[in-house]
Image: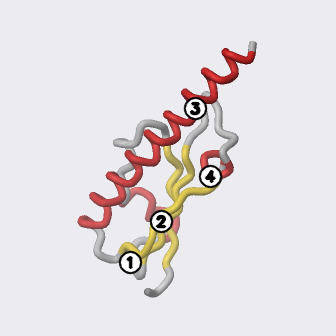
Amino acid sequence: MADRTQDWLKQAIRDLEHLHLRQEAWGQVVAREHPELVRIGYIGSYARGDWGVGSDVDLVIVVSRSEVPDLRRAAEFDATDLPVPADVLVYTFPA
């Protein structure tokens, strides 16, 4: 049983590292396309480390300005390249 737990844990760490690398690459693309970008982070189960099968990643994107209404801002950031589904929350905060 301990071997199965260790195997699961090793795979979970690899999955998390993979997500982090993909998020960084995605963030670099987003930064080139959105000069108003201030910061990208994530919250929720991936940030806490208690994600599981079926979990999505909750991304928080901070921009210095946006003419787009609050509820439509997330549509400006295509997260379909990430390896898991993403909820995108976009907030303004002047840099």
Judged from the image, the secondary structure of the residue bearing numbered disc 2 is strand
Of mark 4 and mark 2, the one earlier in the sequence is 4
Circle 4/circle 2 CB separation < 8 Å? no
- Front: mark 2 or 3: 3
Seen at 60% across and 46% down, the residue is 46
Quadrant, the N terminus:
top right
Name the residue tied to disc 4. Answer: 47
Q: CA distance from mark 3 to mark 4?
A: 13 Å
Residue highlighted by disc 3: 12
On screen, residue 18 above or below 90: above
- Dot placed on the residue nearer the N-terminal end, 1 or 3: 3
Which amino acid type is marked by label 1?
A: Glu
Residue 21 position, x and y percent, is 40, 47
Q: Secondary structure at mark 3?
A: helix
Residue count near mark 1 (Cα–Cα under 10 Å), binned few <14, some 14–19, many ≥20: few
Instruction: State the mark number for residue 67.
Output: 1
When the figure is inspected, residue 85 is found, relative to residue 95, above or below; the finding is above
Tag 3: amino acid: Ala
Residue 3: x percent and y percent? Answer: 67, 16
Quarter of the figure that contains the C terminus: bottom left
